[in-house]
């Protein structure tokens, strides 16, 4: 009897999660350019809803994840660092806990967005960006050769952050984790 109750609860949770996902996707689809403060507020609320979901059960398809995240890339400017940080957490949850396949075109869109964010955003969000890059790099090293120079080349971002003169140990650690994933082929 307990197992059938558990299945019913999981089915209700799954349905609830899917409803929230659909609602959040619609909010982003219907987001209009205009008042930047209202737009940022709506995106902030939407990211909070998405990051508040229970990721222990799979409810995202690859297509849904790609569509949602592409809209986030479009709507979230690098100058809105708190939104970039929330997007980092969302992408990490989706890729690590939802078993979403990272197809090549989407992988390159993600890497393009986050390598650019790494160059533009302030240091307080750098660890989040590096952690997200580490997730993207894991198991994809052979598919991202075009980013190697910017990330691990002689003047690559990751090497700058692990320099003995770099002042923030948390950023250094995040960068080392990302570099480690380059060695996992």
Image: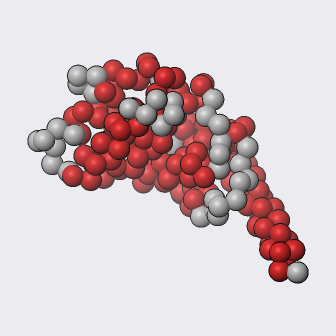
Q: Position of residue 152 (x, y in %)?
A: 31, 27
User: Which residue is located at x 31 percent, y 42 percent?
Assistant: 175
Tell me if 115 is positioned left or right of 92 in this view: left
Quarter holding residue 33:
top right
Residue 101 sits above or below residue 13 on the image = above
Quadrant containing the N terminus in the rendered view: bottom right
Q: Position of residue 107 (x, y in %)?
A: 55, 30
**Can residue 80 be seen here?**
no
Tally of numbered discs? 0
User: Which residue is located at x 73 percent, y 53 percent?
Assistant: 59
User: Which residue is located at x 22 percent, y 34 percent?
Assistant: 160
Quarter holding residue 148:
top left
Q: Residue furthest left?
A: 165
User: Which residue is located at x 51 percent, y 34 percent?
Assistant: 139
**Can residue 85 be seen here?**
yes
Tell me if 28 is positioned left or right of 7 in this view: left
The answer to which of 102 and 25 lies nearer the viewer is: 102
The answer to which of 82 and 145 lies nearer the viewer is: 145
Residue 123 sits above or below residue 103 on the image = below
Residue 20 sits above or below residue 106 on the image = below
Q: Residue furthest bottom?
A: 1
Q: Position of residue 169 (x, y in %)?
A: 21, 52
Q: Position of residue 49 (x, y in %)?
A: 62, 61
The answer to which of 122 and 145 lies nearer the viewer is: 145
Tell me if 72 is positioned left or right of 145 in this view: right
């Amino acid at each position: 009897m307990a197992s059938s109750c558990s299945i019913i609860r999981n089915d209700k949770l799954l349905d609830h999660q899917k409803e929230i996902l659909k609602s959040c996707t619609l909010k982003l689809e219907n987001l209009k350019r205009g008042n930047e403060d209202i737009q940022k507020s709506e995106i902030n609320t939407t990211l909070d809803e998405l990051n508040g979901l229970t990721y222990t059960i799979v409810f995202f398809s690859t297509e849904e994840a790609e569509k949602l995240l592409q809209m986030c890339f479009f709507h979230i400017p690098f100058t809105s660092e708190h939104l970039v940080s929330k997007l980092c957490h969302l992408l990490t949850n989706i890729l690590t806990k939802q078993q979403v396949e990272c197809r090549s075109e989407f992988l390159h869109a993600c890497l393009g967005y986050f390598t650019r964010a790494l160059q533009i955003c302030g240091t307080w969000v750098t660890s989040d960006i590096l952690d997200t890059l580490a997730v993207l790099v894991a198991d994809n090293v052979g598919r991202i050769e075009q980013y190697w120079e910017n990330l691990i080349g002689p003047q690559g971002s990751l090497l700058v952050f692990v320099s003995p003169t770099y002042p923030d140990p948390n950023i250094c650690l995040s960068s080392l984790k990302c570099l480690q994933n380059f060695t996992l082929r």
